Image (cartoon, grey):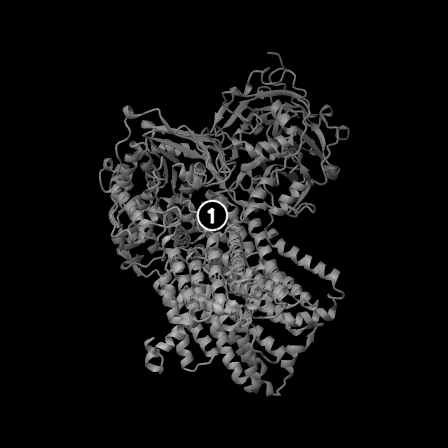
Amino acid sequence: MTDDLLLKIARVSKSFGPVRALTEVNFDLRKGEIHALAGENGAGKSTLMNIIDGILQPDSGEILIDGVPQKITSPTRAQQLGIGFVHQEIALCPDVSVAENIFMSATNVSRTFTMDYRGLHDKAAEVLGRLCAISPATMVRDLSISNQQLIEIAKALTLDCRVLILDEPTAALTEKEAQILFGIMRDLADRGISIIYISHRMVEIFDNCDRVTVLRDGQHITTQNVADIGPGDVVNAMVGRVIDDLYPDKLSEVDRSDEVILDVRQLTDGNRFHDVSFQLERGEILGIGGLIGSGRSEIVKGVCRLECDVSGETFLNGQPLAPKDYQECIDCGVVYLSEDRKGDGIFLDMAISANVSALNLSQVSSRTGILSGTAEDDQAGSLGRKLNLKYGRLSDPISSLPGGNQQKVAIAKMLSVDPKLIILDEPTRGVDVGAKVEIHRILRELASSGVGIVVISSELPELIGLCDRVMVVREGRISGDVRGATMTEENIMQLASVTDAPAA
Amino acid sequence: MLFFSLFVDGFANLGNFKVIASNSAALLMLSCGMGVVIISRGLDLSIVAAMVAGAATFGILTVAGWSVFPAFVVTVLAVLAIGVFNGWLIAYVEIPGMLTTLASAMVITGFFRYEVLNGEYLLMLPSDSRAVQLLSGDAPAILAVLVFIASWLILRYTTMGRVTYALGDNAAAARLSGLPVRLTTLGIYAFAALTALFAGLVVAAASSTVDFRIVTNGSLLFEAILVVVLGGIPLRGGRGGMRNILVGLALIAVLRNGMTLLNLTTQTQDMFKGVVLLIAIVIDNYINPRDTENDTVGDL
Amino acid sequence: MAGPAPFPMRPTDGNNVNNSIKFNSLTRYKVPRLVLSPRRIFSDILSKGWVESAIPLLGFLAVVITIALTTDSYFSGSNMRILALYGADTGLVILALLIVVAVGGLDLSVGSSLAMSAFVALYGFHILELPVLLVLVMSVASGAAVGVVNGVLAGFMGCGALLTTLGTMITVRGLFTLASQAKLVEISLSARSDDLWDWVGFAQFMTLPVVFWVLACVALLTFFMFRQSRFGWHILAVGGNRKAARNGGIGVKKTIFSAYVLAGAIVGLAGFIYAARQNSIAADTGIGLEFFALTALVVGLGGFVPGRGAVVSVLLGFATIYFMNNVLVNSGFRGDFVQLVMGSVIIVILAIDVRFRKNRHRLLAATYLDPVALKLPPVQNMTGLMPSDLAPKLAEATVLGSGEIDGPEDVILDAGGNLYCGTRDGRIMRLAAPDFTEITVLAKIGGRPLGLAFDAAGDLIVCVAGMGLVRVGLNGDVELLSDQTERSLVQVQDDTSIRMGDDLDIAPDGTIYFTDATKRYDMENWGLDLLEGRPNGRLLSYDPKTKKTRTVCDNLIFPNGVCLTHDGKHLLVASTWTCSILIFDLADLAAGPRVFMSGLAGYPDNINRASDGGYWIALAGMRNPVVDLAMKLPALRLRMSKQVPPTDWLFGNLNIGGVLKVNGTGDIKDALWDRASGPLYMITSMREHKGALYLGGVNNNKIGRLDLPGADPDWTGPNRYRKES
């Protein structure tokens, strides 16, 4: 079967400074196959795809297309070679119409001087017609997240490509939209286009893909026909150890108490979430699942008053919790860890100790606002020991740490204020497996010691493995609650997907 | 520095250093204010306007017969008002800092020249004025050192300094950490205006005039930015400190002095400063590369 | 249970005298000519793309009016000519700055660069005594050279634009001062004159100065560049989102570089014009120009926004600032006061703009929905026909294609008895006769296919929500017939595109009549249209001969099902939210509709002809008194939409629907209801074919088939249609 190899990647390595993102990775893609690429966060999937798309250059190794070694120097070059890439994060020009965004790449290939807007509009309508009912003239900033994701996908479909890379395209899609996408993928594959499909979701991989390659810690672990293996094998290969080690023991039925730490009643912001009520019991870890853009982050931000204008009641340990802003919320002992660590979680250039103390500077300063370096170091040091943080010196910038330890610093920051309730949004994103296990253990220990823990995650195995109960959010409302044996990927996905609203 | 020591006679003597120091006092103070603003990822283009406005207020009040202390208090309040206004527009109205201060510089100079100077550029201070006498001799240097130390202490040891770094490093994270972001922005611009006032007083005392032309010709403003950038504080903030200001000041002062000794005209000097700035930018870009793969909008 | 006989079928033809429609005796239905509401106009304006440039325009008008009122003969020809002469170079610089800002950069070196290229021009003209055209080239090259430095540093190397251009600004200014000091005397002593040189500097062409025409040309070219050229589009894409541009394969660095160079060249041209006009330079030439240009840009763009190439707005901003400046100076105000005023203006404009931009969407969302009172007549003529009075006849329906089709809003059968329906994911499915178990995809058209009809040629015509009118051949060919109609003149919102094509029927002459149920909401949000209760829909017609679409009747309340009467002379249109059926006279469409039926028990959807000369009407949902009451109280509905989550809104009961059987004059003869437990729930369409009724539902995953004992077993829609035409 080697003769119908379209793309072959041989011993590609890539480092970012001291961090080795890829080590001698091999990968091959046959004509007309849907090839799943699986791996934990930080396993190197995105790096590998960025190399194929010419965004990054490999340090060593080669890329062969149709058996010919190619240097892919830029996304433009990748396009010329017939490689299309749907990125995980949405990158669209907000003030430009949907049609123009869709054809950004296609128009770039064309050499004429003027733009044919009418033609663009018509062709966009045609492409969009297959996906969804969005008018091509709409401005992108007026679209919902899931529609923007569809536009990203539509972009790639317009390319006359032979290799299509889809990087977690379904994270923000409803089940229905995802099914449409899978149908289109199948059509494309039947026409001989090869698809690299990156996903965490085993169901999607096993329902739609032909082969699966697993990466772990920047290394190629295995490539198998999907028919030959089961989801458990893939998960084990991704994690690199038996799955049982990954998550700490759950709260036993015996230890359950009826004591409620957090009681949220009818929280509404009038826009992105409505009528949200839930309780968090002492000792349990509550998971929140749902699609990206379903409002799960907004809900917890609402609890923390990071979003203005929420109505509803919240009780913390039986006391009404009604802070007027996040600062007061921290004083009440409720802290939130954002999902985007680099974007709005940590201060990359600042010292570890300064990052730890950032949540409440008054703990490490005098009343006049003078900071005490020793108090800061003591705080960071003791929390660091508690979390088994590995570092050189406390005055080193946090950017010198790997992702897992950065995340531990972020957690240390939250613990610095002796919180009563911690809300973590994607706590293990971009964290290696070792640190992931430790973070899970820390969270479990905190929960056992009486701190309320709420975890939002897109990774269903994590929700299922870590949490005692998972609450699923759909379109800004709680669509259900699963615990114990009902906590399965299928159940959660079903609750997360939209049942269609009535239409005329 | 080595270059000038070798090639310029009399460069490396003590007297020359003293000249460098006193010439540089005002620039040092301005750069301290600018440095703090830049560390918070802002930019204060109104700093020179605040400087002459402060000096003019003080000059007029003393000329009008006020005694030094009340006049000084009123001036400080006036200048703080300028800074707080800038900070308010930036933090609360959310206009980008560069545009805010660009406009407020126009407003400040326009206001002073219209209301106070009746269209003139110059405000003459009598040389027997108390202010002039107070600020002669070593006073400018001492003042500069005090401002410098104050900036250093604030940045290094106060919560306001910490928030300043946090803002520059990652403004979104600062907000998500519940830090008093808006209040600190007010403080930062107020502080910058205050340093500008001291710089203005020193310059005014030295020449017995307050000259509004330095706002329009702009070279002082650019020099202050140059000091900060040459010292190695990146414009996108979050890094660097007063040490960098000192380095930058030393470089620029030496450059300025060396070029004077080489008998270069002011124009040639200006041109060289521009070239040095460009080189500094390139070097800075090389040392602190931007993450151009991921930014969605180009930084200014 | 009491009630009429199960299926009182009379095998009569539509032309039966008893059944004919007396159109003129029916009540007129008043269609509003104009739907005006301040709230709607406000929200429509707010939703316009140009609204963000409205603030600069208002500012401009305010300045012009103030000047016209206070200064005599300011806008006279001679004064305008002087202004045009002196403003041209600044205008060019502002355009250059716009290009750089659009790509996401900033250029502070424009003032110095203008001075430098003016010097180059004078040097080339007076000292080197070169031909004027060569001088022009040198000038432009000088500006472009500065652009190259900026472009290399800010574009290729990725240095910060502010600092980079600050550096070039200082450097070029230094060079300029050095050079001009050295050569100024020599230049001023030169006596060379040249016709072309003077023509550029002083002459007028078509009553305006030549330099103004230069500005006009460059402005036009820039406009064209941003609007039509690929390069201009690249600039906007890079300025809008660099990452998106990079992912799209656009050479980001190259584009930034080119933008700086282009801007530099334009500044060079401005320098040439300046030199030709002034024939001299001074030490302060171009000083402060960058700030003036930036001010004009900020005023024009209403802020500092990359990714927008708004040439007209920026020129308006320039004119505003320029007039204001000029008038203030002319009126004896000193430069210092002008500076004060301009600074304040910038702050105020920026403040308004930033706040407006931030809150626009919130404001728009809060004002878009605009409910109005809608009073429904009580349920009429349903004695003994309500679901509680009758056995649920639809419960006996057999189910076709269960689980294999998703959302057949309408169903239709061809002459061969094959069944067709549209689905939610934009396909047309074919269920083959005779047992309908073989299900194939006839065509993929996208959008949301709703109403279906066969034309004389046997092709399927489909109304597609989100697209328009589509023709699907039975071999699977798809052709878009119409997606736009003429624009109504009194609406702020652009209503040319067909938003929610719902149902259609074809007249004997081939004209296709179809409905656009609502112009304001998409398929997913049709519920909001009910909440609004306004006449947002329209009846359209498409003439296949001329391929023209026109609006037959605007401002209908959710016009849904369309059906020609048996005589082919009238058209029935269901108005869903008013629970009534309207009728049009095809011979005199302009006369407007009359009421065929009103006070229905539910919300009528599709209408179709029955074999006995009557009609079938699908009821998509049932009325209930609470909703009827809510429809009378717009304020209540507005509050509900704001405070109650959509899933809890008051709504008609959509889980139970049915079919009404009426005779040719609109008397209800029978009602077919479903059980509360199904199998068909919501019915949106039905089609009679060879003695059976086929039932579709927009949310169903199946089609129902109900035998009609007593109905004409040979009657089919297509046959009948052929007979008529």
Q: Position of residue B292 (x, y in %)?
A: 39, 59
Q: Up-down: is C645 above or below B79?
A: above
- Can residue A45 be seen by looking at this rendering? no
Q: Is residue A62 left or right of residue C699?
A: left
The disc labelled 1 sits on which kind of residue?
Ile
Label 1 resides on the chain identified as: A
Q: Up-down: is C385 above or below C134?
A: above
Question: How many numbered marks, from 0 up?
Answer: 1
Q: Position of residue C72 (x, y in %)?
A: 76, 65
Q: Residue furthest top?
A: C1
Q: Nearer the viewer, residue C492 or A383?
A: A383
Q: Secondary structure at mark 1?
A: helix
- Can residue A288 be seen by looking at this rendering? yes
Disc 1 target residue: A151
Q: Nearer the viewer, residue C81 or B147?
A: B147
Q: Position of residue C653 (x, y in %)?
A: 56, 25
Quarter of the N terminus of chain C within the rendering: top right
Q: Position of residue A180 (x, y in %)?
A: 44, 40
Circle 1: is it few (<14), some (14-19), or many (20+) Cα within 10 Å?
A: many
Q: Is residue B7 left or right of residue B97?
A: left
Quadrant assignment, res A57: bottom left
Q: Up-down: is C306 above or below A493?
A: below
Quarter of the C terminus of chain C within the rendering: top right
Q: Nearer the viewer, residue C684 or C707?
A: C684
